[in-house]
Image: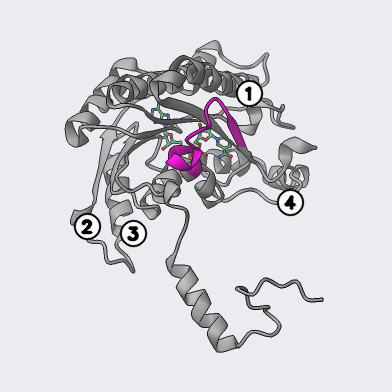
Amino acid sequence: MSSTPARFDSPVNADPVKLSAVAAKARVVKTLPEFSMSNKVCLVTGAARGLGNEFCRAFIQSGCTDLAILDLKEEEAVEAAEELVKAACVDSPMEPEDYRVIGIGCDVSSELSVQQAFRRVMDTYGRIDSVVASAGIVENYSAFDYPFDRIKRLYDINVHGAFFTAREAARNMIPQGGGSVVLVASMSANIVNIPQPQTPYNAAKAAVKHMAASLAVEWAKKGVRVNCLSPGYMLTKLTKTILAHDTELKKTWESLTPMGRMGDPEDLAGAIVFLASDASRFMTGSEIRVDGGYCII
Ligand SMILES: NC(=O)c1ccc[n+]([C@@H]2O[C@H](COP(=O)([O-])OP(=O)(O)OC[C@H]3O[C@@H](n4cnc5c(N)ncnc54)[C@H](O)[C@@H]3O)[C@@H](O)[C@H]2O)c1
């Protein structure tokens, strides 16, 4: 007895012409509306390059037109903003003037700098809906060799920078009814990377993960959700700098990753849009790991 539902064609028996017409129609319906980033004002720190830049691309591809790119050097942030708009208009009915993408110089380790950047964003757009704290650094020193001033700098950027960004986001989001904050942690919040030593980085990312959970509880009833995204080894300038000194290391990292490869920044696009959009509206204080399975073995 066949139990195939009447409304679906079995791929074996279906008319190929009809099937491709259906596939063409299906392509028009892109995704659940909750994943749309249109009408959302977004801000991403550390977004002139790397994962932060990829998050911006994912937001634009999901319909965002109002976006602030924050990075250490204003000229690099502005250049990244211009490139993003240019790329968004290729093979698209959208025109550059349809976008309001701005680049702002901001050192996330300075609370004043973060406050000034958020003020500029509020002055430009009047609201802010989705914020991603992606700015971060990594260094590899063994514990005995790590100069203390460098440890402090790493915590200033990776931990305090995330806190300043989240706090400023919430200060602006609460009066408008809420928003979504995503802190970029790392699989290093959960495991100890080998063979390279990086104790302060790992501890900093564990702090960021618990910071997201703690802030989530503080702001849950005020409409501000705080989650964290924890990537595994991704190919960006951050990791390329480490790999430049050690060509064997990439093979080691790949062999430790069940999926057998490093991630491309685009591999995080779905997760960041999910967390930043209304698709994750009942989710706060959570972590999404996107690590090719690294943490499960
Ligand atoms: N690449 C990976 O494998 C990986 C894995 C897990 C987590 N992460 C995390 O993802 C985040 C982004 O990493 P990435 O790979 O894109 O790094 P990246 O070095 O490619 O980019 C980081 C960006 O942050 C900016 N930045 C650095 N210090 C800053 C500061 N004080 N203020 C503002 N901007 C600053 C840099 O200028 C750069 O544009 C970091 O928090 C990192 O720890 C990366």
Residue topped by disc 3: 87
Is-magenta flag for residue 281? yes
Q: Amino acid at mark 2?
A: Pro
Q: Amino acid at mark 1?
A: Asn
Residue topped by disc 2: 96
Q: Tell which of 297 and 13 is nearer to you.
A: 13
Q: Residue furthest front?
A: 1
Q: Earlier in the sequence, mark 2 or mark 4?
A: 2
Residue drawn at point x = 58 percent, y = 29 percent = 286
Residue topped by disc 4: 260
Residue drawn at point x = 45 percent, y = 27 percent = 225
Give the vertical position of 57 relative to 23 (above or below).
above
Q: Earlier in the sequence, mark 3 or mark 1?
A: 3
Q: Earlier in the sequence, mark 1 or mark 2?
A: 2
Crowd tier of the residue under label 1, counting other residues whose Cα lies within 10 Å: few below 14, some 14–19, many 20 or above: many
Residue topped by disc 1: 202
> Can the viewer see residue 154 in this picture?
no
Crowd tier of the residue under label 4, counting other residues whose Cα lies within 10 Å: few below 14, some 14–19, many 20 or above: some
Q: CA distance from mark 4 to mark 1?
A: 22 Å
**What is the quadrant of the C terminus in the image?**
top right
SS of the residue under disc 2: helix
Crowd tier of the residue under label 2, counting other residues whose Cα lies within 10 Å: few below 14, some 14–19, many 20 or above: some
Give the vertical position of 5 relative to 212 (above or below).
below
Q: Earlier in the sequence, mark 2 or mark 3?
A: 3
Asked if disc 4 is less than 8 Å from ligand 1, the answer is no
Q: Position of residue 125 (x, y in %)?
A: 21, 36
Residue drawn at point x = 27 percent, y = 51 percent = 82
Q: CA distance from mark 2 to mark 3?
A: 10 Å
Q: Amino acid at mark 3?
A: Ala
SS of the residue under disc 3: helix
